[in-house]
Image (tube, grey):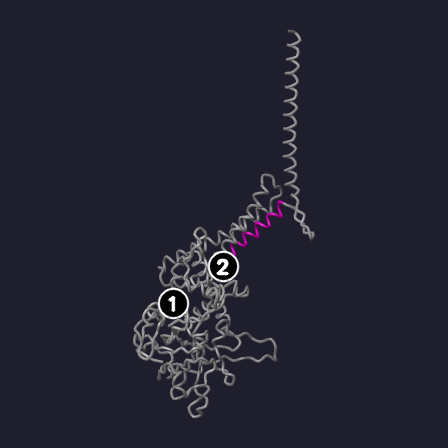
Amino acid sequence: MAAQDSQDQRAENGEISSEVVAEGALQPVEGGQVQGTEAGQSQQQQQQQQPPPNAWQVIKGVLFRIFIIWLISSWFRRGSSPQEPTDPNTVVHAPSRNLFPRDTFMDLRVYISENEQFTEFNNTDPLFWEYPDLVYGDWSSGLNSDGCYEHYGEVKTTERVKNNGSLYIHIYFTKSGFHPDPLRKSQYKRLATVSTTRMLNKFKRRKYEKTKNLLTGETQTDPEIIKRAEDYGPVEIMSHWHPNLTVNMIDDHTAWVKGAVPPPLDQYVKFDAVSGDYYPIIYCNDYWNLQKDYFPINSSLDWLPLQLTFCPLSLWKWQLYAAQSSKSPWNFLGEDLYEQPDDEQDSVKVALLETNPYLLAVTIIVSIVHSVFEFLAFKNDIQFWNSRQSLEGLSVRSVIFGVFQSAVVLLYILDNETNFVVQVSVFIGLLIDLWKITKVMDVKVRLPQIPVAFARSQAHSLTSSLVQSLACSVTHSVTHSLSHSLAQSLACSVTHSL
């Protein structure tokens, strides 16, 4: 691994601009060669061909995330006051404290390894970054006086990593003078060491579509993509890499109670089993890493760039990031069904980065009003059909055609992988149209047949119409016959007289 000086690009809250690093981090450096531009060229071409995300999809995603943030905030306020147990045998957990007081001096050590469990502390090769004497809760140090520190380096790839292997980052914070290696008895202390592990690479599904012109029979698809589609099928799982990662240590000294920390915060707060106190919270923040900036790891990459940033983070901002990064509750439908495309995952982030805040606020308000009116339309439609006693003047064919139309629209948006919220809205409309059929027809399920008949009021109206039409036809026929007979009689009389 070769390390260079830290770069002077930084986004707000300690995030590094992914566009700057993606453009400049893949240049050859001393001690290795990087060839990532050509490796991600084909993927960038596919992304450029994708249409821009729909504004309605962006707003739906923003509204969903606002709801999650509100829910997390409510749980947090509710969980701050422990409830009195009703069972006398219940063990009461007292409020705990942070094991690292404010202004504690810390040493940072970052290791990168292919093993999820790290034990090679005596080997210098996995050591990626070491920074001593950091101050916990310091917001004024660093190059830009914001408490942030940066380090750029490159990670050498092995054959295992090139063939969909994994790379893990192991982050250790120890109080100054201590070491994270448990084998060093004189330098190791359990309550003075906090660590976290995270997989650096990300496995993504890459879809291959073999399309051709139906008139000419020719295709504009890259021959390499066609070959990979033939070898791996329409979907290939590939390991991807992003050159940015931010390590946040939460500046928080809340008296957390074990078992009362609301999700998803509970997965980050770690309590000591003996003392009952909690360790400082370490959060690996990759929220601003756009999906379009990931590139596949293949045999042409010998070195992987990595820009690592350490920044303190407030409790409020950490709650927002944790809520945004939590998995969607719709995942119970299955990962394959609910998996969002890359452009949809980036749409909200790009909107927050590039859209004027006032324009975004107005758009959100308009979207909320639109959603309210949409559900009011559903309610009024149901009330109209539910309170209708007579079906005179209503067409059965129009109801059936409405079901067909809604089904076609639903299939169309499913085929185009539209936003999930839009899919739910159209699906609800289809269910309402199906329910209308039961109001205009008497549908009974008698397996293996499903007899269908007109509803009584509709059948009565149809019978009346048929009777009226038949009466008019008979009257017209009788009148026509009488007129024809009178004309013949008159003609015969005139002939006889002559």
Residue 446, position in %: x, y? 69, 52
Q: At numbered mark 2, what does the secondary structure look like: helix, strand or loop? A: helix
Residue 367, position in %: x, y? 44, 55
Q: Identify the residue position indicated by label 2 in the image.
A: 420
Amino acid type of the residue tagged 2 in the rendering: Phe
SS majority, magenta: helix
Marks 2 and 1 sit apart, C-alpha to C-alpha, by: 29 Å
Q: Identify the residue position indicated by label 1 in the image.
A: 40
Q: Within the image, what quadrant is residue 12 found in?
A: bottom left
Crowding at dot 1, Cα within 10 Å, few <14 / some 14-19 / many 20+, comes out as: some
Nearer to the camera, 396 or 432:
396
Nearer to the camera, 15 or 37:
37
First to last magenta residue range: 422-440
Q: Within the image, what quadrant is residue 332 found in?
A: bottom right
Residue at left 63%, top 16%? Answer: 487
Indicate whether residue 436 is drawn in magenta. Answer: yes
Residue 272 numbered tag: none
